Image (cartoon, helix red, strand yellow):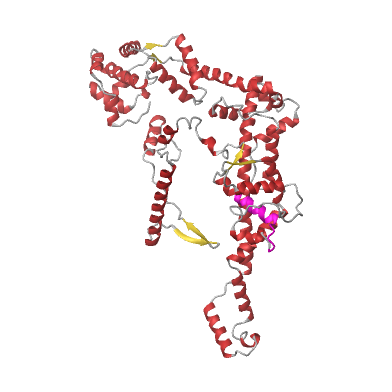
């Protein structure tokens, strides 16, 4: 039972009403207070307290005031005494409850195993569900609640494990899974160990390693709907158990349990490796671009020497040119402004955004063609990129073109003139001159770079999803299974209109209003330090570091309760 109660809650839940006063009329002292608290506790929780400390101190003080007994007398009430036993019987009869029998326990085990365990695995919540069910059946919860919960979990686990293991045994998948832990099977043990490892740092080697790992686990032949009848929580529990086990631990379990645990591990890891591979792709494309930009920035910084006083230099040059129009440059201008200064001016002028972007493109092309390009064929052969948009899908069309040329030698520099090469939605304007030459031919290497960048953005906005993934799965699979049948209920739950036009109109109004407020705040300086600047010639929003938040209001109460229960601790309470 929770320990924090407001005065209003105490009044509503712990006040003795007419019938309650009849029950406590012939009692006095600690017996009167203990009976009253036991009665209201049972009404609230559907069970009796196991310890006096379970009763909230605020409730003890409130009820003590009602029955006119000192609150300190509650410590004299013995829950194991004959009087307390009679009190529990009297309370059960008054509330029309009865003690649980062995038959009730078996029925509760069956109910938990059938109705609750398949969708709930946390033991505390299973206990709560059991207490609620006992209350519905007007049964005092049995004293062996932990035994009932454990028995129900065991029964549900065996039943759930039987389905996948039977399906795998019938299809031959069970033998392939058992080979992973068979004594003396070096290849199987090595694959199991590899499956348990997470990907390394973002890089080409990690991406290629994960690609090999994903292809290896796919060879086990696990069907997509193998765990369709199991809850996600149960599957996650099996996976968490299996990933900690050594091959010898698997061999110590029953064969059906062994197959189910291995299948749960491999199925979960297959989806996780797919997601990890996509994460590596997204991060690697960003890394390639960022590394090229940093390299070019270092080059330009080393080359560039900022020239000061440009206005004065320009005036001197203009005055000298007008004064000596017939003289050659070396004779007329160099004595006024030295050759070195003029060269520095030219270098600075060249180091503009256009030159910067051109150098970035050159650097990107060089690093991609000489090193990173080898990731493209295995990616295209391993990951299944899908898109639900059938009307406009330029990135998917570009991916088909890349797949067509995946096995063609890199010496083939351009795409065939007969190939349809998507440009809009794939190639940015500042890359067009690098992709298309002066004869209109499309070069493969820069186009592949553009496709990878466009693919990264399409994946991040969920326009393109990856078959077999979990986080990067089809967005339509995120919907509840009964969404179409109960669309109205789901829209009401998220408080959104069913009319898409109404949603778009409201969203536009809110976004416009928010942008107007931001614009006004930026203009009058009340934006809290937020500024709009530029970075590499593009708009850039800078946000100041956030201040430390105030301590949550409930944290001090939590600290006080921990101290009250377990005493002062040397643990630091800083947050």
Name the residue located 54 percent from the left edge and 27 percent from the top edge. 231
Res. 527 visible in picture: yes
Quarter occupied by the N terminus: top left
Residue 178, by quadrant, is top right
> In x, y percent, where is residue 538?
53, 60
Q: In this view, which residue lies farthest toward the front?
A: 418
Q: Which residues are magenta?
A: 438-454
> In x, y percent, where is residue 331?
64, 88
Q: Is residue 452 magenta?
A: yes
Front-lying residue, 143 or 61: 143
Res. 294 visible in picture: no
Name the residue located 69 percent from the left edge and 30 percent from the top edge. 220
> In x, y percent, where is residue 41?
33, 21
Residue 527 left/right relative to 388: left
Q: Is residue 455 magenta?
A: no
Name the residue located 55 percent from the left edge and 81 percent from the top edge. 314
**In the depicted structure, whether residue 28 falls above or below residue 272:** above
Residue 418 left/right relative to 70: right
Residue 307, by quadrant, is bottom right
**In the depicted structure, whether residue 165 falls above or below residue 480:** above
Front-lying residue, 111 or 121: 111
Name the residue located 70 percent from the left edge and 39 percent from the top edge. 212
**In the depicted structure, whether residue 81 falls above or below residue 240:** above
Residue 391 left/right relative to 447: left
> In x, y percent, where is residue 253?
65, 21
**In the depicted structure, whether residue 382 falls above or below residue 132:** below
């Amino acid at each position: 039972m929770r320990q924090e109660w407001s005065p209003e809650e105490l009044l509503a839940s712990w006040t003795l009403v007419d019938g309650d006063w009849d029950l406590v009329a012939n009692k006095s002292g600690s017996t009167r207070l203990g009976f009253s608290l036991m009665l209201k506790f049972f009404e609230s929780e559907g069970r009796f307290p196991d310890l006096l400390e379970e009763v909230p101190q605020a409730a003890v003080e409130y009820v003590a005031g009602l029955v006119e007994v000192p609150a300190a007398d509650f410590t004299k009430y013995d829950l194991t005494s004959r009087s307390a036993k009679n009190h529990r019987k009297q309370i059960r009869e008054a509330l029309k409850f009865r003690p649980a029998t062995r038959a009730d326990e078996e029925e509760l085990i069956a109910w938990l195993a059938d109705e609750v365990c398949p969708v709930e695995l946390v033991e505390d919540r299973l206990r709560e569900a059991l207490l609620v069910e006992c209350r519905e059946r007007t049964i005092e919860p049995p004293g062996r609640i932990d035994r009932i919960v454990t028995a129900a979990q065991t029964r549900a686990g065996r039943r759930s494990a039987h389905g996948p293991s039977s399906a795998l045994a019938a299809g031959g998948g069970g033998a392939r899974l058992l080979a992973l832990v068979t004594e003396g099977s070096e290849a199987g043990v090595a694959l199991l160990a590899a499956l348990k490892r997470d990907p390394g740092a973002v890089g080409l080697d990690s991406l290629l390693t994960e690609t090999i790992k994903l292809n290896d686990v796919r060879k086990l032949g696990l069907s997509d709907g193998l765990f369709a009848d199991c809850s996600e929580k149960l599957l996650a529990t099996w996976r968490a158990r299996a990933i900690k086990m050594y091959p010898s631990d698997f061999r110590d379990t029953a064969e059906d349990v062994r197959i189910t645990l291995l299948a749960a591990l491999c199925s979960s890891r297959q989806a996780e490796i797919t997601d990890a591979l996509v994460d590596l792709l997204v991060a690697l494309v960003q890394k390639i671009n960022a590394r090229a930009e940093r390299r070019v920035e270092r080059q330009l910084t080393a080359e560039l020497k900022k020239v000061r006083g440009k206005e004065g230099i320009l005036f001197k040059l203009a005055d000298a040119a007008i004064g000596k129009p017939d003289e050659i440059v070396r004779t007329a201008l160099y004595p006024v402004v030295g050759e070195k200064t003029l060269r520095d001016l030219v270098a600075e002028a060249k180091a503009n955004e256009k030159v910067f972007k051109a150098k970035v493109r050159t650097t990107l092309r060089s690093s991609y063609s000489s090193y990173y390009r080898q990731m493209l064929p295995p990616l295209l052969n391993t990951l299944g990129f899908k898109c639900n948009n059938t009307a406009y899908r330029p990135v998917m069309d570009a991916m088909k073109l890349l797949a067509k040329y995946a096995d063609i030698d890199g010496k083939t520099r351009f795409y065939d003139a007969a190939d349809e090469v998507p440009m809009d939605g794939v190639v940015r304007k500042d890359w067009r001159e690098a992709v298309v030459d002066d004869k209109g031919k499309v070069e493969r290497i820069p186009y592949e770079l553009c496709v990878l960048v466009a693919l990264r953005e399409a994946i991040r906005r969920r326009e393109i999803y990856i078959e077999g993934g979990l986080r990067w799965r089809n967005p339509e699979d995120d919907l509840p299974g009964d969404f179409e049948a109960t669309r109205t209920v789901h829209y009401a739950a998220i408080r959104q209109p069913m009319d898409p036009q109404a949603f778009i109109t409201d969203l536009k109004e809110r976004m416009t209003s928010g942008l107007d407020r931001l614009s006004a705040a930026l203009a009058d300086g009340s934006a809290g330090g937020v500024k709009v600047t530029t970075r590499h010639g593009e708009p850039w929003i800078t946000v100041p570091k956030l201040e430390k938040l105030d301590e949550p209001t409930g944290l001090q109460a939590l600290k006080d309760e921990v101290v009250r229960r377990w005493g002062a601790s040397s643990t630091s309470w800083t947050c």
